[in-house]
Amino acid sequence: MTAEPPESPVTEAVRSLEVRWIFPGQLQAGVAGWFGRFPARTESREDTYLLDPPLPGLSVKIRRGRALEVKAYLGSPGILQVAGRARGLMEGWQKWSFPLGLPGQGSGDQAGWRKVRKRRRVILFPLAWGPAAARAPGPGQQPQCEVELTEVRTCGQDWWTLGFEATGPADLLRSEIEATATLVFAQALPGRAEPGLDECQSYARSLGQR
């Protein structure tokens, strides 16, 4: 893995507020249909996470083999709750992205790193929420909340995750994620109980436990 020359730009730090639930097993068709109420973009990619040495308060990954992403944990403003539908811990993060050159052969297989294959369905909700406001992700700097439903495979195991990520001005992040969650969970997640705190964790934490 080689970084590009110093003159290559570093992505400006992005602040976000996130909630993620992670469930074991394969994604069920009913859940995919529930998510399909809104227009979404689908993508497949492979990310590689640094698990050893453990870095408390940091998440480090290589995204698609093209960028090194570093996320620093900023603390939690509290619990996201949609009555009778979902409950999860909101986590604040600051993220930087560093472009990479071509990775060295086998770099993703080095000790301490874990490859994760993902098939992501992604919806973007701008600040003006409502059924007509959902759209597939695209460029833009406006306050927004990204919602993803992702099928994950790593080390021979299948699991899936539902995540919310609000970005924009810091004073709007909580209202963004709360309003978006209310809209998405207006219809209950099929086939299972209310997603709760037991299933709520980041990718890095989940991978470390597994």
Image (cartoon, helix red, strand yellow):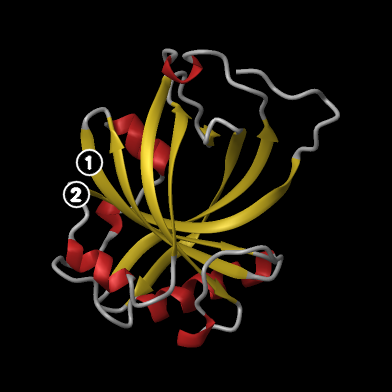
- The residue carrying mark 1 is 158
SS at badge 2: loop
120, 112: nearer the viewer: 120
Do the residues bearing badges 1 and 2 touch, measured as CB atoms within 8 Å?
Answer: yes
Left-right relation of 120 to 158 = right
Q: What's under tag 2, amino acid-wise? A: Gln
Left-right relation of 118 to 180 = left
Q: What's under tag 1, amino acid-wise? A: Asp
* Crowd band around label 2 with a 10 angstrom C-alpha radius: few (<14), some (14–19), many (20+): few
**How far across and down, in percent of the image, does residue 117 sit?**
36, 37
Q: Residue at x 21, y 35 (%)?
A: 157
Instruction: Check the image and name the residue furthest to the left.
Output: 191
Q: Residue at x 18, y 68 (%)?
A: 30
Q: CA distance from mark 1 to mark 2?
A: 6 Å
Q: Quadrant of residue 208?
A: top left
Label tally: 2
SS at badge 1: strand
Q: Residue at x 67, y 52 (%)?
A: 14
50, 40: nearer the viewer: 40
**How far across and down, in percent of the image, does residue 180 sit?**
47, 75
**How far across and down, in percent of the image, does residue 179 sit?**
48, 79
Ranked by sequence position, the earlier of labels 1 and 2 is 2
Q: Quadrant of residue 127?
A: bottom right
- The residue carrying mark 2 is 26
4, 142: nearer the viewer: 4
* Crowd band around label 1 with a 10 angstrom C-alpha radius: few (<14), some (14–19), many (20+): some
Left-right relation of 144 to 142 = left
Determine whether 15 is above or below 117 in the image.
below
**How far across and down, in percent of the image, does residue 187 sit?**
28, 81
